[in-house]
Image (tube, rainbow, N blue to C red):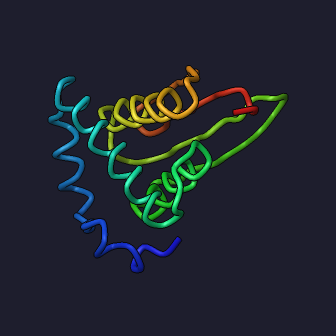
Amino acid sequence: MSWDKYEDKIKMFRIPEESLQHILLHLDEVRRGEAVDIIFNIIRDWTLVSKKKFDIHSCLETLEVYCRIAGVSVEDRVLDGVRSFIIKHNLGQNTSILIDELVRKIFWELVRKKIDTEFTKTTVIVKVTANF
């Protein structure tokens, strides 16, 4: 998926990492929940525009692309029937909590599946049974 191809359609733009860190640092629980809803809707819209469908697989593909564009690394592993996503960033604890809540929302909304997560201030690990 090419960022430039869809950037104008979905009205996204890049901001300096320090600015984003500042914004995310000051999110309280209510604002973080609102941000999760907004981000989920943006990912849905971007997925529909770019892939012409919105299911768990297309959504996760879009999320991975968005993460890479934003400088966030994503590793996708499958071991013993468990699929793990390791998401690494440098944006602090609030970002890890936001990512955790976003991924929980994605899995619940799209496949009604609860996930297991662990996180630190720089990493989120998401674990889910591989058959979804």
The answer to which of 89 and 56 lies nearer the viewer is: 56
Percent x, y of residue 34: 22, 33
The answer to which of 44 and 80 lies nearer the viewer is: 44
Which quadrant of the view contains residue 105?
Answer: top left
Question: Which residue is at the far right?
Answer: 80
- The number of callouts visible is 0
Percent x, y of residue 23: 17, 45
Which quadrant of the view contains residue 37?
Answer: top left
Point 26% across, 43% down: residue: 38
Q: Identify whether 27 is placed above or below 18.
A: above
Q: Identify whether 17 is placed above or below 60.
A: below
* Left or right: 126 as drawn, with respect to 68: right
* Left or right: 19 as drawn, with respect to 56: left
Which quadrant of the view contains residue 117?
Answer: top right
Point 27% across, 58% down: residue: 17
* Left or right: 50 as drawn, with respect to 40: right
* Left or right: 77 as drawn, with respect to 89: right
Point 81% across, 34% down: residue: 79
The answer to which of 130 and 56 lies nearer the viewer is: 56
Question: Which residue is at the far bottom?
Answer: 5
Question: Which residue is at the far front?
Answer: 52
The answer to which of 120 and 107 lies nearer the viewer is: 107
Percent x, y of residue 127: 63, 28
Percent x, y of residue 110: 52, 34
Point 77% across, 38% down: residue: 78
The quarter in which the C terminus is drawn is top right
Q: Identify whether 18 is placed above or below 11.
A: above
